[in-house]
Image: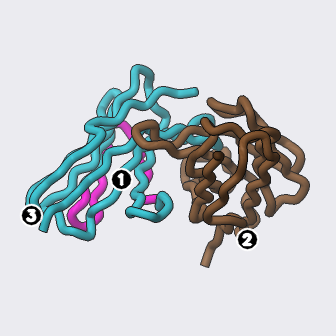
Chain colours: A cyan, B brown
Amino acid sequence: GQQVMQIPQYQHVQEGEDFTTYCNSSTTLSNIQWYKQRPGGHPVFLIQLVKSGEVKKQKRLTFQFGEAKKNSSLHITATQTTDVGTYFCAERYNFNKFYFGSGTKLNVKP
Amino acid sequence: DVKVTQSSRYLVKRTGEKVFLECVQDMDHENMFWYRQDPGLGLRLIYFSYDVKMKEKGDIPEGYSVSREKKERFSLILESASTNQTSMYLCASSLRTISLGTGELFFGEGSRLTVL
């Protein structure tokens, strides 16, 4: 399968601090998707990036796709306790298969 | 509201037992998937089906088989459960598309299997 590496594995932040998780690949990615899994829940789709250098925002979340399409990042500004969960990146490979990074577990202290 | 339903949230089985995990989706999606989720390892693809009776192996198919007799239903079978198959199993579905415009995964709630 495809190899998508995600760092860090864990991140603990104080509420109000920023948070970033990174996905990296040794090969060019056709696209990158991001999912969020709340504690005890299942992954839920957040966004898909397709174009080189693409940046998309959802309120306090900023998603970027690298110029070379080998990396992506998710940045959360001023974290809140509702941001707690595990964030996964995934490549939608060959249009119909999905390979996931190992996830970044975010804990936010109030 | 779209829905992927997994038959059991929690199962406890004994080593050597045959285990069936069932998944049903109501979105008329062509693609269905079984993933295994373990801490620090993310979601690993076990099997993928892109049509009725069609399947492809994922990264970790050993010890598992699947069945897709109807479009809405995708079953994961552990022929002889072992303790290293204790895990969270997630079913998902998506539209089959040749473009990148759509096609995100919709997940079920997960089935946590413990093999003693």
Check residue A75 in the rendering and tell me which mark sits there, or answer none. Answer: none
Check residue A16 in the rendering and tell me which mark sits there, or answer none. Answer: 3
Mark 3–mark 2 Cα distance, whole angstroms, equals: 40 Å
Q: Amino acid at mark 2?
A: Asp
Q: Earlier in the sequence, mark 1 or mark 3?
A: 3
What residue lies at 77% left-to-right and 43% top-to-bottom? Answer: B78
Residue B48 rendering spot, x and y as whole percentages: 71, 42
Mark 2–mark 1 Cα distance, whole angstroms, equals: 26 Å
Q: Amino acid at mark 1?
A: Thr
Q: Is residue B66 visible?
A: yes
Q: Are there few (<14), some (14-19), or many (20+) residues within 10 Å of tag 1? A: many
Q: Amino acid at mark 3?
A: Gly
**Which of the two residues, A74 or B58, is positioned nearer the viewer here?**
B58
Residue stretch in magenta: A45-61
Mark 2, residue position? B26
What residue lies at 49% left-to-right and 34% top-to-bottom? Answer: A30
Q: Nearer the viewer, mark 3 or mark 2?
A: 3
- Dots 3 and 2 on the same chain: no
- Dots 2 and 1 on the same chain: no
**Which of the two residues, A11 or B63, is positioned nearer the viewer here?**
B63
Say whether residue A41 is left or right of residue A82: right
Say whether residue A8 is left or right of residue A77: right
What residue lies at 85% left-to-right and 42% top-to-bottom? Answer: B54
Mark 1, residue position? A86
Q: Nearer the viewer, mark 2 or mark 1?
A: 1
Q: Quadrant of the N terminus of chain B?
A: bottom right
Helix, strand or loop for disc 3 = loop
Q: Are there few (<14), some (14-19), or many (20+) residues within 10 Å of tag 3? A: some
Q: Are there few (<14), some (14-19), or many (20+) residues within 10 Å of tag 2? A: some
